[in-house]
Amino acid sequence: MHGGPLCRQTADKSTCSNVIGIVRRSELIPELEKLDVDFVGVESPELPKQIESATGGMPIFLGLDAVGGPSAATIAGALSPGAHFVSYAWLSGLPIHLPQGDLIGKRLHVQGFWMYYEEFLPRMRGAQTEATQVVAFRKLSLPITATYKPSQIKEAIQHYQRGGKVLLDFDHPK
């Protein structure tokens, strides 16, 4: 789910149907809506029902979590029995929270992914080449709110902590 916008932008729509975005703050909703996401909701107790309504009850077989913490429980709650839950980052700094009712009752397949696992290293160069082409041909857009020079790293970090994605420009380092 959290990785849905990237999936939607780089694959065909049939591969990534019913892309759901979950945000922690409502002001981030427009940012995700621009990325061709089917539904964006704010983390809340009502969110699972909103997701079910937005998808028409269609099954969701893949949940991508970059945040960790309690948002993992929201994703797990929206997944269908036998679905895959993949954690690939921990932006919140918290461990994933997965209710046993979802984990056991739905027989969820929980997987961690890190691109530097030994089995992925041989495919790294090809993936980087493909990613470069995706960016070069503008098939991927990321909502950057500000660009900073490396000498402005302190300001960039402060901006990021307030909210918004920042970019460091190494082409013009000073």
Image (cartoon, rainbow, N blue to C red):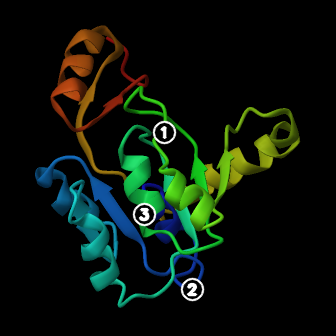
Report the side of 81 relative to 146 (left or right): right
Secondary structure beneath label 3 = helix
* Disc assigned to residue 127: none
Residue 90, image x and y in percent? 47, 33
Q: Which residue is mark 3?
A: 77
Circle 1: residue type: Ile
Q: Position of residue 131 (x, y in %)?
A: 62, 52
Kindly identify the residue that appears in the image at 44 percent across and 39 percent down. Answer: 68
Number of labelled discs? 3
Q: Which mark is residue 14?
A: 2
Question: Disc 1 on helix, strand or loop?
Answer: loop
- Where on the picture, by quarter, is residue 44? bottom left
Which amino acid is tagged 2?
Answer: Ser
Decide if residue 73 is on the left or right side of residue 128.
Answer: left
Give the vertical position of 124 relative to 21 (above or below): above
Q: Could you tell me residue 142's position as x and y percent? A: 36, 51
Of residues 38 and 82, the one nearer the viewer is 82
Residue 123 horizontal/vertical position (percent): 83, 46
Q: Nearer the viewer, mark 3 or mark 2?
A: 3
Relative vertical location of residue 42 with respect to residue 53 in this rendering, above or below:
above
Sequence-earlier tag: 1 or 2: 2
Where disc 2 sits, the SS reads loop
Q: Nearer the viewer, residue 123 or 131?
A: 123
Distance, label 3 to label 2, CA atoms, is 23 Å
Q: Residues within 10 Å of mark 3 (few under 14, many from 20)?
A: some
Q: Would you identify the image quadrant in which residue 33 lies?
A: bottom left
Q: Amino acid at mark 3?
A: Gly
Q: Is there a contact, CB below 8 Å, between mark 3 and mark 2?
A: no
- Dot 1 corresponds to which residue? 96
What's the distance in space between the residues labelled 1 and 3, CA to CA?
13 Å
